[in-house]
Image (tube, rainbow, N blue to C red):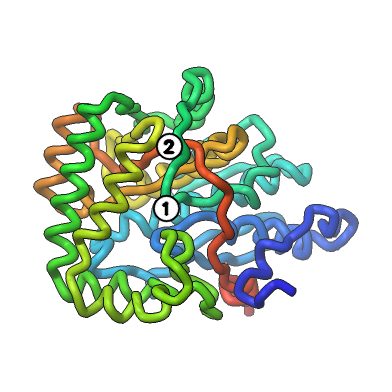
Amino acid sequence: MTANNYKAWDVSEADYPANGPMEERLKFLLRYAILAPSGPNTQPWKYAIHDHSISVFADLSRALPFVDPSNRTLYMSVGCAIANLAVAGAHFGFAPKVSLPSGRRPVPGQDDLFPQIQRRHTTKDRYENAEIEPFILEEIERNINLPGLYLSYLPDKDAKAKMADLVSRAHQTQLAKKEFRHNLGDWLRGNWTTEPDGMPLYTFGVPDVVSLGFPAAFKEFDLSLPVIYRDSGLIHDCSTLAVLTTDQDDKQTWTMCGFALENLLLRATFYDVRASFFSQPIGLAYLREELKMQVNRGHPQLIFSLGMAKPMRPSPRRPLEDVIIKQS
C-alpha cells in the first residue's frame, strides 16, 4: 500500500476522464503538474481551474527568506510545474498555450515527454561511472529554446574544480548562519516521513537510523564539511556540469527558466540521465559575480550536474486538493 504522502505518484493515464466535463479533465492534468521538482520540495504553487484554462500562482507562504531571499528558486519551481502541465495537456489532446502576465509566451516542447514525468527525479547521492554521449547532451540542450536563455556545459576537470570551490565556499558561508540552517532544516525529513513535502534524507543516501535525528542536528550544528564532501562528489563524478543563464533577471525570467529546465530534465530522463542542483553560489552576490565571470554569458540562475544514476524513490507530494483554489 502506498503511503498517503506518496499517492500522487500513482496517477495513471488510463484514468483520464476523456468523456468527462472539462473541469474534471483539467483537474486530471494537475495531477501531473504537482509532480514537478521544487527546491527544496516546498511545492510552492496554487492552481485555479476556469472554463477552458488553468491559472498557476506562486504560493509565497512557502517562501524561504534565508535560503532563497529573492524567491528566484521559488519562481523557477512554479515554471517547472507549468511545464509539466503543458506536457500533460499536449499528451491528452490539448493544444497548450502558455502566457505570463507580461504577455511573454514560453513555447511548449514539440515532443511527447509525458512518459518521463513520473520517471524524473533529482539525484542527491552519487553518480555511476559513465559518460553521457555527445548527441544526448545536444538533445538535452535543445530544450533551452526560449529567447534570452542559455545553457553552458562545463565538462572538463578544471571547470569542475572551480565550481566545486564555489559551492564549497557558499556552504561554508551559509551553513555558518543559524537562521539559514533553521530555514533549510525545516524542510529536511526523516526517511519514514508522513509529511507531504520536504526532502526525505534517503534521497541523500542517509541511512534510516541516522535520518531520525539529522534534521535537528542540521539546525543546531554547522555540518558544512559533510555537505561539501557530498556535493564535491556530485560535481567531480558527474559526466558534465551545466550552468543556466539569462539576459534578464526578474520573476518572469525565473519562471521561464523553470519551464525550460523541466523540459530539459524530462528529455534527460528519456536517456536515463539524472541531475543534481547547486544553487548555493547564486544566493551570494559576490560568488554569483565570480560565476558570471566564469561563464561570461548573462545572469547565472542555476548550476547543475548531469550523469547516469540509479533510479530512486520519489519525494512526497501534497494532495491535489491542497493546491487548488476553490472558486466562489
Kindly identify the amino acid type of the residue bearing the numbered disc 2.
Leu
Indicate the quadrant containing the N terminus: top left, top right, bottom left or bottom right: bottom right
Horizontally, residue 304 falls left or right of residue 78, namely left
All told, the count of numbered labels is 2
Q: Position of residue 28 (x, y in %)?
A: 73, 60
Please identify the residue farthest to the right as the structure is shown: 19
Residue for point 66% across, 76% down: 3
- Circle nearer the N terminus (2, 1): 1
**Percent position of residue 56, x then y:** 53, 59
Q: Position of residue 311 (x, y in %)?
A: 58, 49
Helix, strand, or loop for circle 2? Answer: strand
* Labelled disc at residue 125: 1
Amino acid type, residue under disc 1 in the picture: Asp
Visible residue check, residue 108: no
Mark number, residue 306? 2
Residue 50, by quadrant, is bottom right
In the rendered image, the residue lying farthest to the top is: 135
Of badges 2 and 1, the one in the foreground is: 1
Q: Are marks 2 and 1 in contact (CB under 8 Å)?
A: no
Task: Check the image and report above or below for 83 versus 180.
Answer: above
Query: Horizontal placement of 147 versus 171: left or right?
Result: right
Residue drawn at x 65%, y 52% is: 118
Residue located 17% across and 75% down the image? 178
Q: Residue at x 59, y 49 (%)?
A: 84
Q: Position of residue 252 (x, y in %)?
A: 38, 48
Q: Is residue 67 visible?
A: yes
Q: Nearer the viewer, residue 77 or 273?
A: 273
Residue 318, image quadrant: bottom right
| Residue 271 marker | none
Identify whether 133 is placed above or below 223. Answer: above
As measured in the structure, the alpha-carbon distance from the residue carrying label 2 to the one carrying label 1 is: 13 Å
Label 1's element?
loop
